[in-house]
Image: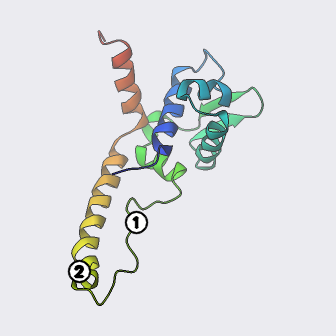
Amino acid sequence: MQFSSRLPIAVHILLAIVEFEGKNKTTSVFLAGSVNVNPVIIRNTLGQLKAAGLITVKAGEGGSALAKKPEDISLMDIFEAVEKEEELFHFHENPNPECPVGRNVHAVLDKRLLSIQEAMKQEMKSITLQSLIDDMNHMLDPNE
């Protein structure tokens, strides 16, 4: 299964904003160096995160900051901010009604895929940015 890299990039950006707060200005160029992507991708993602109310951005060399507490930002919030498609699965729209498989595939599969999608969304809602920060801090200093 393949998902876009938008969510991992957005999470990386948010973790970097927290990690470097007060140490470095988290500009798009600085964040691009951490994520290792073009600054245009970072600027687009920052714009989406800002539009969703998750961060603030100071124009020019001001950098970015969280607009909410990390414990109030879930993976689902981040996903909804950066993904164009909110649905995780794209359903095949025109199966052949003359084929016994085509005629029945939606009845067999759609409900199950929606159930999987809902379970995934619920799991994403339960994971906060704070829990990711805690995990990252533990990895940076395993003696804590």
Circle 2 SS class? helix
Q: Could you tell me if residue 4 is visible in this image?
A: yes
Snapshot colouring: rainbow
Which part of the image, by quadrant, shows the C terminus?
top left
Image coords of residue 129 (percent x, y) = 43, 35
Image coords of residue 40 (percent x, y) = 67, 38
Tell me the CA gap for discs 2 and 1. 18 Å
Kindly identify the residue that appears in the image at 49 percent across and 29 percent down.
15
To which quarter of the image does residue 62 belong? top right
Residue 138, placed above or below residue 71: above
Residue 112 horizontal side relative to residue 77, left or right = left
What is the residue that sits farthest to the bottom in this orientation?
98
Q: Tell me if label 2 and label 1 are in contact, CB under 8 Å.
A: no
Q: How many marks?
A: 2
Question: Mark 2 Cα within 10 Å, few/some/many (few <14, many 20+)?
Answer: few
Residue closer to the observer: 127 or 16: 16
Disc 2 residue type (three-letter): Val
Image coords of residue 24 (percent x, y) = 63, 17
According to the picture, the residue beneath numbered tag 2 turns out to be: 101
Kindly identify the residue that appears in the image at 53 percent across and 57 percent down.
84
Q: Could you tell me if residue 27 is visible in this image?
A: no
According to the picture, the residue beneath numbered tag 1 turns out to be: 90
Disc 1 residue type (three-letter): His
Circle 1 SS class? loop
Residue closer to the observer: 100 or 119: 100
Image coords of residue 2 (percent x, y) = 38, 50
Kindly identify the residue that appears in the image at 62 percent across and 37 percent down.
42
Circle number at residue 122: none
Sequence-first tag of 2 and 1? 1
